[in-house]
Image (cartoon, helix red, strand yellow):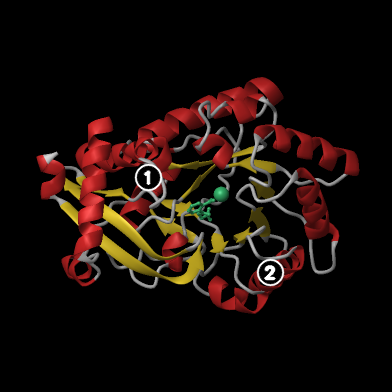
Amino acid sequence: MEELLAGAAVVALPLRVRFRGIEVREALLLRGPAGWGEFAPFAEYDDATSAAWLAAGVEAAWAGWPEPLRQRVTVNATVPAVPAEQVPEVLARFPGCTTAKVKVAERGQSLADDLARVAAVREALAARTGDGARVRVRVDANGGWSVEDAAAALTALTAGRGQGPLQYAEQPCASVAELVALRARLAAAGVAVPIAADESIRRASDPLAVVRAGAADVAVLKVPPMGGVRAVLALAEQLRAEGLRRTGTPVPVVLSSALDTAVGLSAGLAAAAALPLVSGEEQLASGLGTGSLFAVDVAEPRELAGGALPVGPVEPDPELLQRHAAPPERRDWWLRRLRRCHALL
Ligand SMILES: O=C(O)CCC(=O)c1ccccc1C(=O)O
Ligand SMILES: [Mg+2]
């Protein structure tokens, strides 16, 4: 605990746009012998959940990560639930990205809002690539739809005016049973939208259950809630083996961020870079471009070029750490949380 406290810095970083109800991202950064780690569970998470996030931060700062298999990782543009008019300015922050993940089913919004936002993304990306052939659009509902709403929305998002194919729908409904029911409905209606599981993996007591139930075509994995890069790679291997057993093809895995600072993103990139692929398999774009959603960060942003980010550690800039230090009462809150979660490790 004393070692953790000695290298701890708490920051509050403003975002460019509201994302998952957050306008300022707080994080506790840890400096250890192997580098920097991040402890940034969202404020409402309980200590038992948050302890896994601490394990990931400790791994980064005290153990480091497995060797990368590739030096650059292709990422998706992440489009928050903004009005359609704001889509071009969001996408401008993701140079060269031809895959976009669009937030949908936001509370207080309608299907018309989702349709307009996704159509605007399709239009902007088609203009970017010239012909639209390389454009991939995915949506993330964060479990916000009922089976009925999801079936209607995914039908409209793939068949309506200005729409087109979806690479996948991430967590369209909250429960595994609903995902199974949705899949059956989409198949019966001839709507070809693969389903990706996110919360059904990271919040489940059994992270393999969703794939075992045949409810997910793609697995979205995040390093912090799974407890580190090694843990996420081990889970990826289990999920892929389960998919292989069920369908003859390993489940594709998408590494994604938890709205991490530049420090936390290094861990996600390390996992994405170390993920083994089968022969001929092309890695799906990772959701690790979220640094572009930050107005300021703790280090110079990595260069996002051609839709890919370089892998490797980052060193926070001491001046940025100081300038964006959290207010004293928030720092104390994070240090108390750190102590409680450390006791649970
Ligand atoms: O995957 C991405 O493009 C960005 C990451 C993202 O969406 C996210 C970030 C923080 C918390 C939850 C989520 C999510 O995937 O639901
Ligand atoms: Mg998600």
Looking at the image, residue 52 lies above or below residue 262: above
**In terms of secondary structure, where does tag 1 sit?**
helix
Quadrant (top left/top right/bottom left/bottom right) for the N terminus: top left
230 left or right of 173 in image? left
Q: Is residue 253 visible?
A: no
Looking at the image, residue 144 lies above or below residue 290: above
Q: Is residue 181 visible?
A: yes
Looking at the picture, how far across and down is residue 335, in whole percent? 21, 50
Which residue carries the number 1 mark? Answer: 270
Q: Mark 2 against mark 1, which lies toward the viewer? A: 2
Indicate the amino acid at tag 1. Ala
Looking at the picture, how far across and down is residue 203, in whole percent? 51, 37
- Whole-angstrom CA distance, mark 2 to mark 1, is 31 Å
Q: Which mark is residue 287?
A: none
Label 1 neighbour load within 10 Å: few <14, some 14-19, many 20+:
many
Callouts 2 and 1 close, C-beta under 8 Å: no
- Give the mark nearer the N terminus: 2 vs 1: 2
171 left or right of 77 in image? right
Looking at the image, residue 309 lies above or below residue 95: above
**In terms of secondary structure, where does tag 2 sit?**
helix
Looking at the picture, how far across and down is residue 156, in whole percent? 82, 59
At a point 70% along the width and 25% down the height, the residue shown is 247
At a point 33% along the width and 36% down the height, the residue shown is 66
Looking at the picture, how far across and down is residue 34, in whole percent? 19, 43
Which residue carries the number 2 mark? Answer: 117
At a point 88% along the width and 44% down the height, the residue shown is 190
Indicate the amino acid at tag 2. Arg
